[in-house]
């Protein structure tokens, strides 16, 4: 356990210093050649859990320290250990002992005693410590105060449930490739493989528990893909038909690209500004047995890559704050700053303007974010409609999206997304 605690403490520290969690973990694991699959999985679980509840754990830790702790590694090791004591199933005695051993490896003579004292004091005083932070919103919800304030102002009815949803473990949802199967028949294949699941619609299946993709029937043959149910709405809302010329802008890693191609035989251009991420798109398409023209370019500056032929459909899955998918990307809460929202909104405005002139008359553009903040969503669309007289917003097909004006709130079955279908009239 101490190896997993050490790696998690390092990962947490690097994320809090501003680095992306996926990159941090990948780099750490590359330098740990002797790590076992179990230690790797445990390190990842501890890192995600600690960051998910970071603000609460930090509030508890500050009560246990007599003075600020200058050693960053020991600080983060204590946070990881507190996460285990509060949320994990591991025995308290084992957690404390292993943390002390992890501290000993720093060769700092004071570290063992401090870690032991802090964690044992927590176990003795836990009820009192938790009562003291009961009225602290940041500790209670484990989000930055600006985030809490923004959701409360924009969603006066749903803000608390949205915050709570973001702290849950995300479900593992599959998109069944309709070229091979439907959800009902694939569900039987899952059950035959010993996997419990339920259908969400004709193409979506939610597993009772997450499993490696190697256990999914027909995964390597492209019969199913891992994709959040809310993200699956994109291809449905885009309203594609055989023979259409389609652009998927900002396409990586290619989940929505593949879904569109599963639904219709279209002439697909998949564009992204990152060559490395385009390789992932190609790999996903190869697994599905599908093809597209891959283009590296900037969606806001299409003159550098567009061939001049208009598109019947454009999927604009634009860069955003990712505030709707924090349960999958727990580092987002601590990496984002309030001023980032305006910067994303400006980038989105430029992309919308850049892509609009590529759309054929009568064509449709689907604007998508994985954000819940209004500035990136309906406010963005309202401003665009004011400046673009040939644009009209069309109603969404899915009932939940219709009732919420295209905003899908994060919940037990899906993450948070925003959809706006625009037609050139």
Image: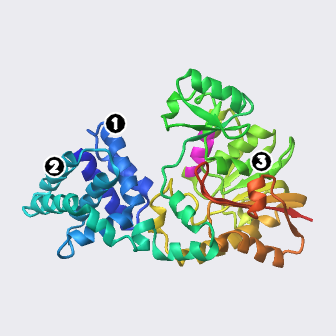
Q: Main secondary structure of the magenta part?
A: helix
Query: Circle 2 is placed at which residue position?
Result: 97
Which quadrant holds residue 108?
bottom left
Screen quadrant of the C terminus: bottom right
| Residue 392 x/y as whole percent | 87, 67
Instruction: Work out whether mark 3 precedes mark 2 in sequence or the reverse, and give the earlier one.
Output: 2
Dividing the picture into quadrants, the one containing residue 283 is top right
Counting other residues with Cα less than 10 Å from the Cα at mark 1, is it few (<14), some (14-19), or many (20 or more)?
A: few
Q: Is residue 273 above or below residue 284?
A: below
Q: At x 56% / y 62%, what residue is drawn?
A: 161
The residue mark sitting in front, 2 or 1, is 2
3D distance between C-alphas at marks 3 and 2: 53 Å
Q: Left or right: where does residue 403 sit relative to residue 328?
A: right
Q: Residue 339 at what x, y percent from top left?
A: 54, 78
> Could you say where residue 269 lies in the image, as x and y percent from the top left?
74, 49
The verdict on residue 158 being magenta is: no
SS for callout 3: helix
Name the residue rendered at 53%, 77% in the picture: 149
Q: Secondary structure at mark 1?
A: helix
Give me the C-alpha separation between circle 3 and circle 1. Answer: 38 Å
Is there any visible trace of residue 231 in the rendered image?
yes
Mark 2 or 1, nearer chain start = 1
Look at mark 1 in the image and give the residue it sits on. Answer: 37
Q: Out of 108 and 412, give the one closest to the viewer.
A: 412
In the foreground, 329 or 172: 172
Q: In the rendered structure, are the residues bearing label 2 and label 1 in contact, judged by CB atoms less than 8 Å apart? A: no
Distance from label 2 to label 1 (Cα)?
A: 22 Å
Q: Which residue is mark 3?
A: 236
Q: Which residues are magenta?
A: 277-284
**Disc 3 crowd, CA 10 A, few/some/many (<14, 14-19, 20+):** some
The reply to whether callout 3 and callout 2 are in contact (CB within 8 Å) is: no
């Amino acid at each position: 356990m101490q190896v997993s605690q050490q790696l998690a403490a390092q990962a947490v520290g690097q994320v809090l210093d501003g680095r992306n969690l996926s990159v941090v973990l990948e780099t750490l694991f590359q330098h740990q050649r002797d790590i076992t699959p179990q230690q790797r999985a445990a390190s990842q679980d501890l890192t995600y859990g600690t960051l998910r509840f970071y603000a609460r754990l930090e509030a508890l830790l500050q009560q246990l320290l007599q003075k600020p702790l200058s050693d960053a590694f020991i600080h983060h090791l204590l946070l990881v250990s507190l996460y285990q004591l509060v949320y994990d199933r591991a025995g308290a005695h084992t957690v404390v002992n292993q943390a002390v051993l992890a501290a000993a490896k720093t060769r700092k003579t004071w570290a063992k005693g401090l870690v032991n004292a802090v964690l044992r004091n927590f176990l003795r005083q836990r009820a009192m410590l938790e009562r003291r932070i009961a009225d602290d919103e940041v500790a209670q919800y484990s989000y930055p105060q600006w985030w809490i304030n923004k959701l409360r102002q924009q969603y006066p009815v749903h803000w608390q449930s949205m915050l709570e949803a973001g702290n849950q473990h995300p479900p593992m949802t599959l998109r069944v490739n309709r070229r091979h199967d439907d959800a009902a028949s694939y569900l039987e294949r899952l059950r035959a493989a010993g996997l419990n699941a339920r259908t969400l619609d004709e193409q979506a299946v939610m597993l009772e528990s997450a499993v490696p993709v190697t256990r999914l029937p027909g995964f390597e043959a492209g019969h199913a893909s891992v994709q959040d149910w809310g993200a699956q709405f994109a291809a449905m809302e885009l309203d594609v038909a055989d023979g259409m010329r389609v652009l998927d802008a900002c396409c990586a890693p290619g989940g929505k690209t593949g879904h569109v191609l599963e639904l219709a035989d279209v002439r697909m251009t998949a564009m992204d500004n990152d060559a490395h991420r385009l390789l992932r798109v190609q790999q996903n398409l190869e697994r599905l047995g599908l093809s597209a023209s891959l283009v590296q370019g900037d969606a806001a500056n299409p003159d550098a890559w567009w061939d001049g032929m208009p598109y019947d459909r454009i999927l604009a899955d634009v860069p955003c704050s990712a505030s709707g998918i924090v349960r999958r990307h727990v580092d987002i809460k601590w990496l984002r700053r309030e001023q980032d929202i305006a910067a994303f909104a400006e980038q989105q405005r430029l992309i919308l303007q850049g892509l609009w002139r590529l759309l054929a008359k009568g064509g449709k553009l689907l604007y998508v974010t994985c954000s819940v903040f209004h500035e990136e969503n309906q406010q963005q669309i309202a401003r665009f409609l004011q400046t673009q007289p040939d644009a009209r917003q069309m109603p969404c097909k899915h009932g939940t999206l219709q009732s919420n004006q295209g905003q899908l709130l994060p919940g037990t079955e899906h993450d948070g997304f925003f959809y706006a279908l625009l037609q050139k009239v």
